[in-house]
């Protein structure tokens, strides 16, 4: 009887003591879930492919410009001038650019579907929390070909990784950025709004 | 009788728990016993906890520093005082390197002036990007040693650093970090970036979405320690999945009394003054010391490399 009691006490103690280990095991089992990807029709997939082609065209046009991309320097003014020069060249190369050129009316609902799936999927709460932690500024005045509105010291809203896993990949130098419910396509080297999609984030 | 039984169970369980905690990190007193401060430190009036072993890798850690205000200068002054003895080669930056405007004068006032003496001594600063940083100017700003990249890696002795951009953790960056970690042969793998994976600070809290993506990579490829900022406090988090976590986000900014207290997450938390850290890696040991703007040491100790005899069991 005494032996049974001792076994019981030891088992209980070991169970209690193992609680933090269980918590650690749970954290390591935190798998790379990616996201609840929306099931797309062939037509929707084709729209995303067409979007990626438009992005490639933009990048090809930018590479052909005479303006240099930024490279490491100790002079901040030179870096700022270089960025301005690239932005000027881009604006001249696409003077008639307007909202919807890349996020066309055809692909816009596909993006909204992808984002809705991510936000309502298993990581939806984490994505919303992540967006809230990133010091969101509320609606900002985005203009195609305009400077991305972060140069007066406003924090640049970070983009949750599982949201990015749901979207078509972008080439180096282009980024998806979130501003309130709008998703922008930002040219990082020029710090310029290439296009934006209103009502993207549900 | 029942009460006595429960008491025994509780005591046994608590004994096990305390035992686990002690294996996670040696106490500061232990570190002091292992290595008394060298004479020059005492002569300089410094309460140095690092052993300053021959051939060790030494660096300082700052985060959320770029205000250009007097408290940032006070921390920079303490860093300079300690540098005279520790001679750390470089400084890692947890992000928010330049708050507010990003003009030439901002970079001068918020970085070049406060750290002028260290820069003059050729101490290198390796920045990561915070949400207040201008990513495209700063990654190309030569004194931040980012080589034009949002994320990059560098090696010092036995330590390889993986500097990530937690503002924009896209699939390309995740593939990059996985590839670099997989192929790393470094004895110590240390990652740093801006957004916290674990924190007891109240203002933002942890970024669980980022944690979902990074923790599997860190555990799979044996990252030893992680630093981040964003919250304007200091925390030494209890090891999570066997990895050591530090939050140093108070080297310029401060959120006074912002830590949840008590909390089960932190081994040590400090939120009543600005701080920076000194770190020394020697063999399988990582020594650390956290120092305030007035020169007070608020945390110190030694961590053992995971996989060695003295590693934490968690």
Image (spheres, grey):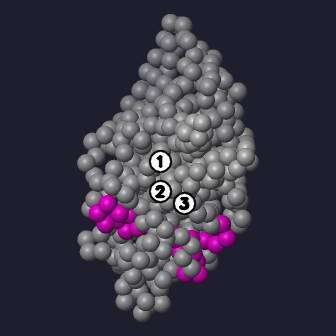
Residue B280 lies in the magenta-colored region: yes
- Mark 3 vs mark 2: in front: 2
Q: Are marks 3 and 2 on the same chain?
A: yes
- The residue lying at 50 percent from left, 37 percent from top is A25
The disc numbered 2 marks a residue on which chain? B
Q: Are marks 1 and 3 on the same chain?
A: yes
How many angstroms separate mark 3 from mark 2 (CA)? 12 Å
Q: Nearer the viewer, residue A65 or A177?
A: A177
Disc 1 target residue: B314
Q: Nearer the viewer, residue B233 or B1?
A: B1
The disc numbered 1 marks a residue on which chain? B
Quick one: label 2, few (<14), some, or many (20+) residues within 10 Å?
many
- The residue lying at 31 percent from left, 40 percent from top is B182
Image location of residue B259, percent across then percent down: 68, 59
Residue A148's tag is none
How many angstroms separate mark 1 from mark 3 (CA)? 16 Å
Residue B274 lies in the magenta-colored region: yes
Disc 2 target residue: B24
Q: Which stretch is magenta? A: B271-295
Q: Visible in this render: residue B223?
A: yes
Q: Are marks 2 and 1 on the same chain?
A: yes
Q: Element at badge 1? A: loop
Indicate which disc, 2 or 1, sits on the residue closer to the N terminus: 2
- The residue lying at 57 percent from left, 21 percent from top is A36
Disc 3 target residue: B236
| Quadrant occupied by the C terminus of chain A | top right
Image location of residue A74, percent across then percent down: 40, 65
Indicate which disc, 3 or 2, sits on the residue closer to the N terminus: 2
Q: Tell me if label 2 and label 1 are in contact, CB under 8 Å.
A: yes
Q: Visible in this render: residue A188?
A: no
């Amino acid at each position: 009887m005494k032996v049974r009691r001792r076994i019981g006490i030891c088992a209980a103690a070991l169970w209690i003591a193992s609680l933090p280990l269980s918590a650690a095991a749970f954290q390591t089992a935190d798998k790379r879930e990616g996201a609840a990807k929306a099931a797309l029709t062939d037509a929707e997939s084709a729209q995303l492919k067409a979007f990626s082609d438009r992005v490639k065209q933009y990048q090809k046009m930018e590479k052909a410009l005479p303006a240099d991309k930024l490279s490491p320097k100790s002079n901040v003014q030179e870096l700022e001038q270089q960025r301005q020069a690239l932005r000027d060249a881009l604006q001249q190369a696409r003077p008639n650019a307007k909202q919807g050129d890349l996020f066309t009316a055809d692909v816009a609902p596909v993006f909204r579907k992808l984002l809705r799936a991510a936000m309502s999927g298993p990581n939806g709460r984490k994505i919303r929390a992540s967006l809230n932690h990133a010091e969101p500024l509320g609606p900002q005045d985005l203009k195609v070909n305009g400077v991305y509105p972060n140069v007066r010291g406003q924090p640049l809203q970070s983009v949750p990784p599982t949201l990015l896993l749901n979207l078509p990949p972008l080439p180096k130098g282009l980024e998806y950025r979130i501003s309130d419910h709008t998703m922008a396509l930002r040219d990082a080297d020029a710090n310029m709004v290439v296009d934006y999609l209103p009502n993207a984030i549900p | 009788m029942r009460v006595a039984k429960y008491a025994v169970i509780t005591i046994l369980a608590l004994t096990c728990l305390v035992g686990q905690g002690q294996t996670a990190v040696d106490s500061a007193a232990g570190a002091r016993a292992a290595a008394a401060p060298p004479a020059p430190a005492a002569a300089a009036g410094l309460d140095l906890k690092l052993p300053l072993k021959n051939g060790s890798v030494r660096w300082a850690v700052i985060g959320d520093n770029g205000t250009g205000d007097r408290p940032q200068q006070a921390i920079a002054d303490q860093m300079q005082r300690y540098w005279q003895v520790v001679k750390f080669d470089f400084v890692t930056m947890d992000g928010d390197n330049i708050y507010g405007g990003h003009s030439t004068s901002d970079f001068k006032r918020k970085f070049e002036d406060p750290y002028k003496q260290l820069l003059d001594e050729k101490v290198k600063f390796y920045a990561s990007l915070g949400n207040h940083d201008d990513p495209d100017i700063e990654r190309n700003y030569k004194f931040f040693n980012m080589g034009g990249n949002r994320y990059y890696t560098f090696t010092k002795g036995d330590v390889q650093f993986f500097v990530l951009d937690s503002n924009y953790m896209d699939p390309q960056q995740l593939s990059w970090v996985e590839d670099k970690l997989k192929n790393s042969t470094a004895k110590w793998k240390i990652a740093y970036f801006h957004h916290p994976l674990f924190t007891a600070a109240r203002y933002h809290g942890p970024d669980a979405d980022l944690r979902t993506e990074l923790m599997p990579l860190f555990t799979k490829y044996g990252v030893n320690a992680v630093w981040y900022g964003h919250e304007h406090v200091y925390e030494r988090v209890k090891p999570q999945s066997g990895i050591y976590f530090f939050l140093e986000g108070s080297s310029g900014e401060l959120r006074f009394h912002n830590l949840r207290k008590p909390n089960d997450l932190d081994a040590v938390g400090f939120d009543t003054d600005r701080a920076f850290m000194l770190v020394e890696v020697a063999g399988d040991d990582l020594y650390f010391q956290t120092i305030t703007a007035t020169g007070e040491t608020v945390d110190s100790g030694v961590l053992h490399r995971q996989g060695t005899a003295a590693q934490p069991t968690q």
